[in-house]
Image (cartoon, rainbow, N blue to C red):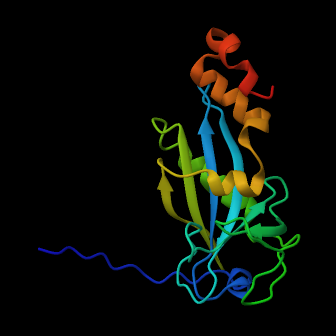
Amino acid sequence: MFKLLFEKKIEQHHLLRRIYPESVNTIRIDTLRCVSGKLVMSGALLRVGKGGRKVDNWSGPQGGIAIAIDLEKGCLNRGGYDYFLNEYPSHPDSGFSFDNTIIPFWKELLGVVRQTANLFPQANSIGWDIAITEKGPIIIEANTDYGITSLQTTNGPYLKKRDFINALNEHIGISKYKKRYEKYFVV
């Protein structure tokens, strides 16, 4: 027997539709919970489809583009990358320039991620996929087994991010392993 799930079609915010209208363009943001309970957000990006594709997935030859989002300001960086590290200062189909574009409802998005992450205290690391509608952010899915390659490609290596390192250190007990691993961590 088949089971079906019917959902309303997501109507994304007009700004994201201008970037690429064929897919729902989502924001990927990750959270890492420290042993102390503090929540760290190490990186965020906007994923957009391209080439007529109906999805915004980043991987493989048919994948889309990932553009870093400044976590403080909620704006896109100057360019995005596909899976093969080809750089895109603007969208190849729409011509939309990514540079300094402000993501709508950014503060609300961060609040939704923080609030929802706290509902899952047993999950220390989550990759959140969020759509932005005219009314605000909606969570598409939460991934506990997600790749951070796209996040590091666009936002830089996580081992150069102090908050990430501190959170990771709490989990592995860096004082116990400091001599063995200190050459790998920029602290």
Residue 46: image location, x then y, percent: 69, 67
Q: Quadrant of residue 125?
A: top right
Viewport quadrant of the C terminus:
top right
Q: Quadrant of residue 122?
A: top left
Can you say whether 104 is above or below 44 in the image? below
Q: How many marks?
A: 0
Q: Is residue 86 shown left or right of residue 23?
A: right
Residue 96: image location, x then y, percent: 80, 84
Residue at point 70% right, 11% down? 179
Give 159 or 100, whichever is nearer the viewer. 159
Residue 48: image location, x then y, percent: 65, 75
Residue at point 83% right, 53% down? 72
Give 101 or 147, whichever is nearer the viewer. 147
Viewport quadrant of the N terminus:
bottom left
Q: Is residue 134 shown left or right of residue 53?
A: right
Residue 75: image location, x then y, percent: 83, 65
Give 104 or 34, whichever is nearer the viewer. 34
Q: Is residue 120 shown left or right of residue 175?
A: left
Residue at point 58% right, 73% down? 63
Can you say whether 47 is above or below 15 in the image? above
Q: Quadrant of residue 41?
A: top right
